[in-house]
Image (spheres, rainbow, N blue to C red):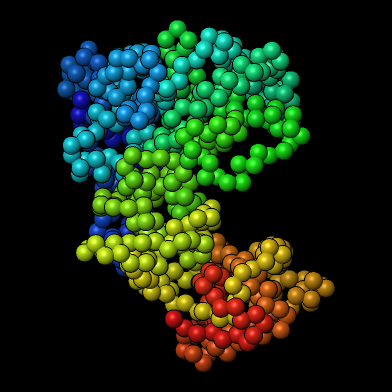
């Protein structure tokens, strides 16, 4: 059933309120995007405008009040997260027959049983969105975070999981133990060390059950659901509270539907992993060094499967994390429609815009994300180590973009700039920067120099105060440290001095360091590149080309130039 606008706003009220509170931010972001790249900006809508155009449909029982009475409303709804069936992936035999929901009849019936009443609705994307209407689909995709955050409960369907009888028994046994443990914690209002001590004494797994419990967890964590980008999105944006925690549905040994809370499966994964670590004397599996293993649908080891659910155990969107970091993380998961990755990254990053344009390749997604990040004041795209993007123009000819696809990932947190207007224009092909290039920076920075840089910044710069007199300051160069502290004290609160700039100075040697402030100041006044209230010492803190593009003039004189 298509719901009325009044019913839609009631159901989405709490999540929509967050969008309303960020309306001014959204307008500023879109306005800045129009300044920088008007050709790209036309493909965006404000989140609030998209919600106004959102068509909200629900699966309702024939005897529901809203069906019989046009003035009635759907009071709440369940949202279903599941894997679409396709020829390359098959559900277990118990998942028959299929329904037009996109899930099997046993699963559909179980979902209906989970409703509070016959009036509660069910939202399933395959039939609650008109799949033939591209305009409606784009609006719905961009609003999916609001839909999943507003549901009364998220129901996760695992149709490729059927437990053995032993796994069935041990799963239910320890699910009951977990529930009783949680009940005692709530009733006694245990916190901190008291809570930790109680859990350690209460949660005891019989040695005879360990092997089977591991098999149960491996099967529950091995579902295809964990490898899909949209499923990761749905788990991320939904709030994981104690009440109405997301619920997994799977098949028991006899074909009946079993349910386990998300936090229970997560608890099994974490506690068993800790047990394995203790038995291995704390040694970490080698695969943890390469997060790309998460893109492997099978994830054969227990650690891999634990890591996947750990990445999904996040409450709501996190706008403090860089959009590029969100995109890098979400790209580890599979997605049937590659263009959807852009919407997924924006939703999980809390970007208050909706993209309604067309996307042809993954490289275009990285460029669009870089553009949004810069328009929002996050200059991560200028600092990441990346490989060049290949973008096609309107004629189909490819060119190399200024933006890159992160191969080591962007900085997790947003990298703010105190001078955002220094970027004046960008297209996929080029970006116009008020950029001071330093030819004396080394090609590669040693880990030792980065360590020293981090230590110095933490001790003298990040505290936003004059450094105290001392041997360390004198040995490094008191003049430079004081100059940098002055930069920090005059910069916005969220500005951080790039570690790589200082590390480059350390790498180039003491003579280079001693000349740095004076040369920058001289160049600022003679080149006409900086305004009276912006000296070059501050300019160098704002933008730099990453080390791979620098000359290797180790220890040679500093020669700034404008580009």
Q: Does 466 sit left or right of 321 as displayed? A: right
> Where does residue 517 sit, x and y in percent of width and height?
63, 83
The relative height of residue 11 versus residue 439 in the rendered view (above or below) is: above
In this view of the protein, can residue 243 be seen by the observer?
A: no
> Where does residue 307 sit, x and y in percent of width and height?
57, 36
> Where does residue 370 sit, x and y in percent of width and height?
41, 59
Q: Residue furthest right?
A: 471
Q: Residue furthest bottom?
A: 526
The relative height of residue 113 versus residue 512 in the rendered view (above or below) is: above
Residue for point 66% across, 18% down: 210
Residue for point 56% across, 86% down: 559
Q: How many marks do you count on the picture? A: 0
Q: Residue furthest top?
A: 254
Q: Quadrant of the C terminus?
A: bottom left
Q: Quadrant of the N terminus?
A: top left
In this view of the protein, can residue 548 be seen by the observer?
A: yes
Depth check: give the residue in front, 399 or 217: 399
Instruction: Name the image quarter holding residue 200.
Output: top right
Depth check: give the residue in front, 558 or 478: 558
Depth check: give the residue in front, 419 or 11: 419
Q: Does 372 sit left or right of 358 as displayed? A: right
Residue for point 70% across, 27% down: 275
Q: Does 123 sit left or right of 297 as displayed? A: left
The relative height of residue 394 versus residue 75 in the rendered view (above or below) is: below
The relative height of residue 372 versus residue 336 in the rendered view (above or below) is: below
> Where does residue 334 sit, x and y in percent of width and height?
41, 40
């Amino acid at each position: 059933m298509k719901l009325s606008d009044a019913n839609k706003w009631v159901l989405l009220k709490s999540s929509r309120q967050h969008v309303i509170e960020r309306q001014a931010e959204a307008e500023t972001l879109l306005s800045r995007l129009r300044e920088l790249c008007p050709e790209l900006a036309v493909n965006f809508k404000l989140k609030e405008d998209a919600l106004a155009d959102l068509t909200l449909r629900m699966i309702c029982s024939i005897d529901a009040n809203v069906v019989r009475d046009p003035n009635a409303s759907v009071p709440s709804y369940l949202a279903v997260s599941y894997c679409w069936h396709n020829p390359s992936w098959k559900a277990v035999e118990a998942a028959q027959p299929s329904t037009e929901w996109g899930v099997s009849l046993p699963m559909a019936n179980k979902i209906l049983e989970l409703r509070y009443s016959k009036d509660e609705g069910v939202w399933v994307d395959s039939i609650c969105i008109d799949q033939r209407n591209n305009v409606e689909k784009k609006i719905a995709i961009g609003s999916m975070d609001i839909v999943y955050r507003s549901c009364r409960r998220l129901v996760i369907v695992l149709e490729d999981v059927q437990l053995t009888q032993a796994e069935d028994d041990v799963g239910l046994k320890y699910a009951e133990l977990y529930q009783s443990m949680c009940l005692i914690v709530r009733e006694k209002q245990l916190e901190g060390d008291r809570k930790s001590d109680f859990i350690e004494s209460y949660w005891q797994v019989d040695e005879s059950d360990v092997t089977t419990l591991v098999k149960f967890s491996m099967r529950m964590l091995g579902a295809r659901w964990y490898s899909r980008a949209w499923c990761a999105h749905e788990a991320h944006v939904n709030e994981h509270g104690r009440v109405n925690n997301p619920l997994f549905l799977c098949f028991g040994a006899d074909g009946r539907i079993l349910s386990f809370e998300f936090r229970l499966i997560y608890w099994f994964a974490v506690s068993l992993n800790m047990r394995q670590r203790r038995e291995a004397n704390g040694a970490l599996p080698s695969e943890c060094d390469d997060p790309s293993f998460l893109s492997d649908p099978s994830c054969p080891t227990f650690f891999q499967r634990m890591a996947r659910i750990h990445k999904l155990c996040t409450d709501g969107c996190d706008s403090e994390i860089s959009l590029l970091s969100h995109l890098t993380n979400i790209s580890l998961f599979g997605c049937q429609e590659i263009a959807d990755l852009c919407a997924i990254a924006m939703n999980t990053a809390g970007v208050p815009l909706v993209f309604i344009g067309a996307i042809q390749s993954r490289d275009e997604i990285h460029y669009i994300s870089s553009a949004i990040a810069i328009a929002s004041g996050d200059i991560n795209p200028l600092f990441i180590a990346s490989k060049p993007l290949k973008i096609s123009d309107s004629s189909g000819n490819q060119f190399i973009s200024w933006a890159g696809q992160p191969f080591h990932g962007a900085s997790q947190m947003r990298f703010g700039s105190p001078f955002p207007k220094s970027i004046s224009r960008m297209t996929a092909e080029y970006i116009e920067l008020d950029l001071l290039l330093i030819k004396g920076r080394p090609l590669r920075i040693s880990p030792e120099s980065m360590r020293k840089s981090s230590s110095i910044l933490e001790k003298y710069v990040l505290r936003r105060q004059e450094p105290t007199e001392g041997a360390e300051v004198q040995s490094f160069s008191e003049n430079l440290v004081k100059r940098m502290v002055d930069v920090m004290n005059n910069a916005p609160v969220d500005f951080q001095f790039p570690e790589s700039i200082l590390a480059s100075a350390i790498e180039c040697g003491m003579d280079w360091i001693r000349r740095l402030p004076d040369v920058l100041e001289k160049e600022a006044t003679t080149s006409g590149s900086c305004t009276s209230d912006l000296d070059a010492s501050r300019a160098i803190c704002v933008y730099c080309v990453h080390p791979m593009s620098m000359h290797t003039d180790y220890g040679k004189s500093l020669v700034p130039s404008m580009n």
